[in-house]
Amino acid sequence: MQLINSFDKELKYKLYSNIRKVVHPSISKRNISNYKIVLNDKIVPIRVFYPEKISDLKNVIIYVHGISLVSGCGSNYSEICQKLAIKTKQLVIAIDYDENKYYLDILKDVSQCIMFVCDELIKEQIDFKNITLMGDSIGATIVLGVNKLSNYEFKKNILISPILSGNYFTDVNILKNDKVNLKLINSLKKYYTKSLKLKKDYNNELVFPLLGDGMINNNMLIITSGNDFLKSEAYTYSEHLKNTSLLEIPFVGHGFLKEMSLDVENMFFTGVLEFLTV
C-alpha cells in the first residue's frame, strides 16, 4: 500500500517487520529507510536510519519530528535523520505519526509507540541507558510529554527548539520586518487552534510544559537558536531543571535543522556528541 509520509516527498511503501530485524539487519536491509516500518497494527509506523557501520548497533536515538507547519522541515526529516545517524554513529528510529490528528492524540500515539519500541529493544539486549529520546520543535514538546506518560525514566533527552508555552496567543512584540518569527508565531496559532480539541487543553502541561509545577528532571540537553523568538522559554524552563545543559546556536532561527551551514552543523553535532558520550 502506497502512502505519503512526513519525511520526504516521495511515496513510500509499508513494510511489516520487527525490532530484531531492525537491530540485526542483513546487507539487503540497508535500504530499509525507504519504507514505513509497521511493527504492530496497533501502533504508528516507524522510519529507520542506519549509521555507516551496522554490524554492532548498541546505541539508539528515538526521534520525534516536529509538526511541519511550525518547524518548516517537512519533507526534510528523512535527510535530517539520516545525517543524525551517520554523525552520531547510532541507529535512529523515527516515529512516523499522523500530523493531522489532534495534538493529545498524537502524544498518545507517539508515547505508545515509543514504549513498545523500548520494550522490544531491551529484548534485543540494547541497554536502556543507551536509548536517547530526541525531538525538534513540537516534536521536542512531545518528548517531554512522553517522559511524563511513559513507564520508563529516560536517561538522555535532547530537545531542539521546544515549544513550551502558549504565551504568543495574545499580542507579541515582534518587529514587523522580522518575517521569520512572525511566520513562526502565526503558524503556532494556526496549528494549536486546529489541533486542540477542548478549551481546557490550553491549560494542560502536556501541551505547554511551562504550565506544570513539576518539571522533568531526567538528563536533558536543550538546544535553542539565537534568532528564535521562543528561545527565552527554553532558558526559563532549563532554570527549573537539575540535570540540564543548554546550547544556543547563534544566527539561526527555529527550524534551522533543514538547512545548516557547515559552522552551524559542526556546533550542533559537537554539542549532541558531547551530551551523548557523557
Image: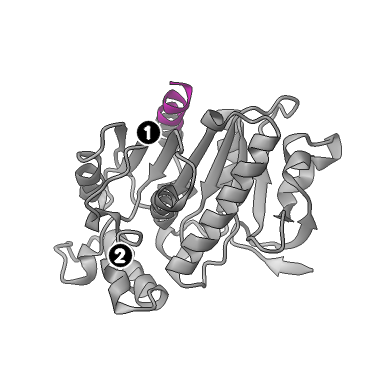
Quadrant that contains the C terminus: top left
Which mark, residue 219?
1
**Residue in front for this viewpoint, 249 or 239:** 239
Q: Which mark is residue 204?
A: 2
Main secondary structure found in the magenta portion? helix
Q: State the SS at label 2.
A: loop
**Percent position (x, y) of residue 94?**
59, 49
Q: Residue furthest front?
A: 151
In this picture, is 137 found above or below 28? below
The x, y position of residue 115, in whole percent, is: 57, 49
Residue at screen point 60% across, 31% down = 90
Report the amino acid beneath label 2. Asn
The magenta segment: 269-278
* Alpha carbons under labels 1 and 2: distance apart: 23 Å
Does label 1 or label 2 sit earlier along the sequence? 2
Question: Is residue 222 part of the magenta span, yes or no?
Answer: no
Q: Nearer the viewer, residue 141 or 111?
A: 111
Residue 149 visible in the displayed image: yes
The scheme the figure's colours follow is one colour
Quarter in which the N terminus is drawn: bottom right
Q: Quadrant of residue 93?
A: top right
Q: Specify whether 86 is left or right of 141.
A: right
Which residue does the image show at 52% across and 67% down from the upper left? Answer: 99
- The answer to whether residue 259 is seen in the rendering is no
Q: Which mark is residue 247?
A: none
| Picture coordinates of residue 6, whole percent (x, y) | 59, 61
